[in-house]
Amino acid sequence: MKAKQRISFTEGPLFWRLILFALPIMATGILQMLYNAADKIVVGQFSGDPNALGAIGSTTFISGLIINFMAGLGSGAGVIVAQLYGAKRENETSRAVHTSLIMSVGISVIMSVVAYTTAEPLLHLLGTQDAFMDGALLYLRMTYSGILATSLYNVSASILRAVGDSRSPLVIGSVAGIMNVVLNVFFVIAFHMSVDGVALATVISQYFSAAAAIAILAKRRGECYAFSFKKLRCDRRFLLRILRIGVPTGLQSTCFSITNMITTSAVNTFPPEYVTAHSVSGNIDGMLDVIAGSFCQSAMTASGQNLGAMKPDRIKKVFYYSLIQSMSIMLIVAHTLRFFRAEIASIFVEASTPGYDTIIAAVSEWTGIMLATYFLQGAMNAVLGTVRGLGYSMAPLILNIVGTCVTRSVWVFLIFPLEPFHTFSGLALLYPVSWASSALLLAIITVVAFRRLAKLESEIKAKESAASGASAERPPQKA
């Protein structure tokens, strides 16, 4: 993408720029969800293996543990690069970019080893049913070989977005998505493979995405964020700053994955049709989550650039605009999907599948509750994006863990076993309850962030006043 296609948030109108920046991120996320969903659609419709769909569904939240943590580290890199880029500190921007890429390689190698060795114990811990165990373990271990690629892509995409380019990741995601779908069909239909075929297709497309993102960074010669092998050095100062933001963000995502695993363990107490329904519902949830996440990324980039440029007034506008946009879009999209939830569910499940009617009804039951209040998730992401762009890390982590993770765990272990709530819909109630709890807690950090902005604004005005006074007192120069 050319330089003119990058969006700067430090000058000009903000409202439509936030939307224009978020749209490619949204499209990228949806495409990624679609080609992940393609794994399930292909094996569900064409593999001939009745347990394949449930096997892949059993791995969703386990694989998210590592991948979401790496994505959080990428967000940390994006915040630092956005702040430095907004402040026009070019040498430091370059050092932060190369430090981020080195960090992603080192940590992803370690996490790959950990993920591979813990895959089977985690599946047993979740109570994965015997019919799904072999396929789930095979799928997990194969896709874990792509953690390195996923990490490199996430960091590279975060860097591009931090400088205002959200379109390049969209192009990469589009091509990778098409590649993944074609390979899915090829391996499953032509070679009669099952979960191993879709896993292989996923890994190949992940490495393509990573290579393409780094290639784009390398071609940005003359830009302060361009990648060069000659500049690959780890700056300890920037590494610590990235980790200070990225690790809490990654831990927050990991905690969500752990909470989802706890939810999955509760789902596994229902008949197999409900396990499959939960897997299908996860795709709908995931698609909405990436839409909300696009506004989080937009707010984070915009607030980070304006913090670097020392423009607190614009950061306040970023917050309000993002909040309105995110809640409105989520309200419209979620209720549209809620209306067509049964039809969407039928895309994933072949009509001849045993228990087909039960699966469709269970998807409608689960998503009917989840989608009704999804706009609260939109509000949470707008707040999180703004405060992360300002450099806050631990406070959002703690408040979100308490509001979402702790609340959901309490619901699963204490409320769900009670007779009135010991149903599939009773378990699904953890969504609106946890979102409402998190929204109330995040209001606290919003107040703290606005006080910091008010203080920053006062400091800027004091400096401007002092500079103006000094200029007025300076005697006129003789001609």
Image (tube, grey):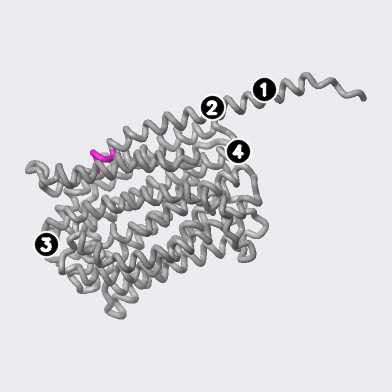
Name, please, the residue furthest toward the bottom. 191
Say whether disc 4 or disc 2 marks the residue closer to the N-terminus.
Answer: 4
The residue pinned by badge 3 equals 355
Task: Please say if the residues under marks 1 and 4 sit with CB atoms less than 8 Å apart.
Answer: no
The residue pinned by badge 1 equals 465
State the SS at label 3: loop
The residue pinned by badge 4 equals 309
Say whether disc 2 or disc 3 marks the residue closer to the N-terminus.
Answer: 3
Q: Amino acid at mark 1?
A: Ser
Q: Say which of marks 4 and 2 sits in front.
A: 2
Q: CA distance from mark 3 to mark 1?
A: 73 Å
For the image shown, how many numbered marks are present on the structure? 4
Q: CA distance from mark 2 to mark 1?
A: 15 Å
The residue that appears at 15% across and 43% down in the rendered structure is: 414
Q: Which residues are magenta?
A: 431-435
The residue that appears at 35% across and 59% down in the rendered structure is: 34
State the SS at label 4: loop
Crowding at mark 3 (Cα within 10 Å: few <14, some 14-19, many 20+): few
Say whether disc 1 or disc 4 marks the residue closer to the N-terminus.
Answer: 4
Q: CA distance from mark 4 to mark 2?
A: 16 Å
The residue pinned by badge 2 equals 455
For the C terminus, the image quarter is: top right
**Can the viewer see residue 329?**
no
Q: CA distance from mark 1 to mark 4?
A: 18 Å
Q: Amino acid at mark 3?
A: Gly
Crowding at mark 2 (Cα within 10 Å: few <14, some 14-19, many 20+): few
Q: Say which of marks 1 and 4 sits in front.
A: 1
Q: Say which of marks 3 and 4 sits in front.
A: 4
Horizontal and vertical percent for residue 137?
26, 69
